[in-house]
Image (cartoon, coloured by chain):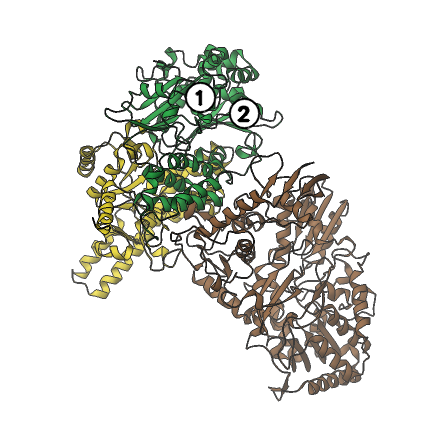
Chain colours: A brown, B green, C yellow
Amino acid sequence: MINLTIDGVPVTVPKGTLLVEAARAVKQEIPIYCYHTKLGPAGLCRICMVEIEGMPKLQIACNTVATDGMVVRTQGERVEAARAVVLELFLVNHPLDCPICDKGGECDLQDYAMAYARGTSDVADPKLAKPKAVDLGPTIVLDEERCIVCQRCVRFDDIIADQRQLVVKDRGARDIIATASGRPYRHNFTGNVTELCPVGALTSKTYRFKSRPWDLNRTQTSCTHCAVGCQQFADVRYGKLLRTMLVEEDQISDGWLCDRGRYNVGFYESPDRLAQPLYRKNGALVQIGWDDAFILWSHAIRKAIAARGPASVGAIGGGRLTNEEAFALQHIFRRLGVNNLDWRAGSQRQATPGAKGAPLAAIDSAEVIVIAGESPAERAPVFWLRLHKAALRNGARIVRESGPQAARSAAGDATRVALVWDGIDLAVGRSYAQAFADVGELATFITSEQSNARGAEAMGMLPRSGPGYAPVQPGDDTAAMLDRARSGALDVLSIFGANPVRNGLDSAAASEALAKTPFVVVSELFMTETASMASLILPAKGAFEKYGTTTNLAGDLLPVNASLQAPEFVRSDFEMLCGLADQLEVAMPSFEEIDGAVVAHVAKAPQDFTLGDERFAGAAVGLAKRNGQAPILSGGGTWRHDPWLAEMRASGAAR
Amino acid sequence: MPVTKVLTAGIGEADLRDIETYRQRGGYRQWERAVRELQPADVLDLAEKSGLRGRGGAAFPTGRKWSFLPSEKHPRYLVCNCDEAEPGTFKDHMLLEESPHLVLEGMLIGSYGIACHHAFIYIRGEFKRGYEIFCAALEEARAAGYVGKNVFGSGYDIDVTVHRGAGAYICGEETGLLNSLEGKRGEPRLKPPFPAIEGLYGMPTVVNNVETLAYLVPIMERGAQWFSSVGTERSKGYKIVSVSGHVRNPGNYEVALGTTVREIIELAGGLRPGRTFAAVQPGGGSSACIFEEHLDWPYDYESMTKAGSMLGSGGFIVFDDTTDFVNAAYNLVRFFGHESCGQCTPCREGSSWMERVLERLVRHRGIPGDYEMLLRVSGSITGLNLCALGDSIEPFLKSVMLRFPEAFRSRIVAETVAR
Amino acid sequence: MSGETRDVMSRKLGPTCGATEGGSEEAEQQERSRDGGATSGSEASRRTARRKHQTMVEAEQNFAALLERLRPECETLMARYEQKRSALLPIVHLFQGHQGFVSLEAMNAAAEMLEMSPAEVEAVVSFYTLLYRRPVGKYVLQVCRGLSCSINGAEDIMAYFREKLGIGHLETTGDGLFSYEEVECLAACDRATCMEVNLEFVYDLTPAKVDELLESIRAGTYGVAPMTQTLPPGRTWEIAQNDQIASGRKSPGAVRVEDPDNAGGVGDASGTIMLDHLINRDVYMFGRTNERAVVDSRAVVETMGERADHAGH
């Protein structure tokens, strides 16, 4: 540890700590533009000047390592004079269009100018003219005049996203941020640069000229577009979701968001959203009230159980619900004696890695990362970013060999190995688990295609395991349910946030199964292929409209908080299930009991489970079809109803 | 007259580009002696004892620079800096075109001194002819077995790569040069780490000026004592001074350090008839002017610093009474603005701002406050920059503004900037 | 990797490889004879479009052929360095030597060879003043505006050049013969005013020497070879005397180059860009004009006269 003094306060920091970080330890903020904790020092903006005893010149705090006995001053005449000069220089060419700038109110240049700059300016000459509103690509617009060339975006693109699409062109005062000629700025993480930008140079097309930051209501929640569960802020104004922002944290997202998580939120506003329960009467869909819906639903279930027993009833879903909803779902059906329960509606078989599971941060220290099955790049983008960081910065080797034996020999004698599996083919998972059984610190991850797949498993939405992975009377899995439905053995099938007709390999078979099931209930946001075949369609709330928790692929229990008011006749799956339970006279546990159960069950790592465990067996419904779109959206297909994404796609294609 | 021909010996008399001519005059003998008879440590010792300091501008002791290389880290590289673009400096240009073998021999000896096996020479893009001449010389030397595997049967391998720049003054800054050599934008790097620890390809690297390396050849031949006995207490040996501007015979003059400023002007034929002396910029575009009172000062590193300027690269521009110093100041500030890489704020924004103000002054469109603003801004950006370029704007500007305030103030005629 | 690419390239070229030169002209002639000389407007435009397409295909093939030819040399350059990325400047110098500028195709080819992103290559190329990303004249005249030359008459020489050529800094004459540029210190201050013609030095300039230089270049008797000049498909040299106000240029003879690729791109929505954009430097200075005035003495005198008038003298 290193002992130094910052502004008269003694500080102890680990060896190698930069002064800019050490100052934070004593709550002394040093202004920065180019420096960023996750990007490291660049030494470009020159605003972080500090005075160090024994050094004649001021030093930049972002590239000076704290040494023992150092006496640092972050205040005082010299430091403040230097800051004032740098700020004055930024403002030589930076336009003062703050009143129409999206960044106004949360702009580092504004803030520091208020705090440190001189009140007046000697600049009498016109400012340099540069291109404004440069269309960088599908997501981002760049204002070259506002750019202060801190190169955070360029460095993000290089060392974090590993894309090198954004660069500085030209030189001197004429330099600009640009992409290669004729190529749009386009990859999975572009939105992050808008947040890294300390000024209003890089702005999201979705948020341009929409709001002032002080008018926004901010809610922290978890992204449910994939199983990483990145923490994000939902910024809402007058009941409209205007943007989502990243939360700076190390545990889950490492401080980044993918573009899907950031921009695929426009569907809440879509006019296509289901707005009221729909019932198929004589072949046509009619709007009904919720009470009638619950009566129809419960009658169908009662009738089926009475006629052919609980085996004629089944429920699919949970991977896109909250933990609480998944718990309630299996609770009600198991109380009725129904064991045909499965969250697995796509190709994935298993979501919990069992005893060898690990927190996401375990990736950072891995020496070798083995990827079995599908790449996490699309399934869990921010997780992929973390893998990439381990490779780029920590020297981890990413191994993608054709088989477990080849991967094992490629990993050599590394003791810290991360094994990343897609959870699809149990035999593959098993063979990799066996091949790497001898590794000292094995951290295994399953990149689920549904955001709360792991939570659904912990809550017992599996045909052979109940809440907390407890053994239960076995029932049918999804494939078996659909098989039996095709032979006319299933009477009522309730589907929650799943779309087997679109995502099953055999779309026709799933379609046939639903056609042959007398009563199909689907809870959805949109009229999906599956919903359109249902007898009863229930309009559901999205994740920004309800409260609950979700479990990410590493088993972290994360909050889901409402930031938006749902449309009037739309209910959450939990509310629907309560209505059903009411009609069926099934006693629901209290909220406290559910909360307790969720916490307890998510915390349980099934010690005897391993990758590719037999207990998850059963035929896969089929490999999810990609259709050129991200597989995570396999459920409701919200991207199709997202005007923001549609716009981005259109403008992307135009370039 | 105090002119001494060491590096410049033979230039203009014989075709030193021809390896035969060069060899007849003793060429490559020192290289042979180094690899055959000396250890790298001996060469380093020689460089250190000679008191040779960097001739590119920073004047860092050459031997000390070499000694910073960490002994355990290999490979290491020597890079010869021939990106000569400092305004008023044209000595490397001459050496490259007139005596390429001397430059090469110096590089080879320097490489041996730091025990590296791959040396580079970075030649300014505009020196296309010089590049071709050097490449031809290198091929001759390679054919003669002076460059390559097992030179002179000593078991020592050395390869030399010639790299041509593409137009950027900032690539003369050693880390900008290394970036450029690595195929990147020639932007100076953040230091630390210094090139001696992490230079080319992240390995220990020494970057030396053409003239510095060339002096290794006569130092090898005549000994460290010969070199260090010339000059002043801390400025040893000889220096090629590029004299230009308002003199009768501009050109490169090799002198012992410590020769007076007046003597150098006299060497170049003195001022033109009917003109009177105004100032000298003694160390390239980055240096401050010195004036009449300094004419009899010795031209060495310490004296020039003491006079408020620097010896720098040895670009020696003489100004007589016809000089428009506002235009001259504008010329240099525009130069630095044009050549600023644009990475760091003070240099990028400061240079472009001052350039605009000076441009108005040149057009007699100054406004009240311009004079004070120029002095304040040029002064306050100094010391804040990532590399030395931004700090190079102030010296000349300030020196002439303080010396000839009226020249500047008389251009302040308008109330506001016409838009 | 590179071998594979080569195969793909040569397959793509196919048998037309040898027959590209003059191929389009021949086809055009055939077409003209078929039309019997009389062509309606729509047919003519159709033919222009077809010809444009042909030229583009041709240019693509020409580049592929050039790349094929230069690839071994590129490999040699790459082998000189411990990391092949170092060969970027040598490789773009090589392409500029053969094309007269560093074309987008060349940058993309370099990116592929050096395992860099295309944006990185452009970023590097745009940093250096001797690399042109757009076509320039056959003779690039670079007059030194450094301090030593400046105090020894460079400003008069530059004014003379501008007058004689009819163009300003970073512009090209309408016939595509000359590009004119005022450059920083060329390190030949002892022989001020100096300049470079296609990177060959010319010393001790006088107006008479300038006349002689321009005349001999125009007459084709000058000792320095012209730069290769390739115009990318769809672009034509064209004098735009009447567009000077729109372009903000004061000097006559400014050249417009049609650049369909750049439509809607950075800084220009019209798809028409001025040659200073083409050279890609000094572009964004002072809004509409980039005139970084090298102030010649006469202008100063005029200004002073103006001032005297205002003062009532």
Quadrant of res A321: bottom right
Q: Residue at x 82, y 56 (%)?
A: A608
Classify residue B82 as left or right of residue B116: left
Q: Nearer the viewer, mark 2 or mark 1?
A: 1
Classify residue A143 as left or right of residue B15: right
Q: Nearer the viewer, residue C224 or A199?
A: A199
- Say if residue A623 shows up in the picture: no
Quadrant of res B141: top left
In which quadrant will I find the N terminus of chain B? top left
| Up-down relation of residue A446 to residue A517 (above or below) | above
In which quadrant will I find the C terminus of chain B? bottom left
Residue A353: % across, % down: 74, 56
Q: Residue furthest bottom?
A: A282
Kind of residue at disc 1: Asp
Label 2 sits on residue:
B65
Residue B257: % across, % down: 43, 18
In primary-sequence order, the first of circles 2 and 1 is 2
Label 1 sits on residue:
B300
Residue B267: % across, % down: 32, 18
| Up-down relation of residue B356 to residue B318 (above or below) | below
- Please state the chain letter of the residue tagged with numbered disc 1 in the rendered image: B
- Say if residue B185 shows up in the picture: yes
Classify residue B407 as left or right of residue A404: left
Label 1: element kind: loop
Q: Nearer the viewer, residue B382 or C237?
A: B382
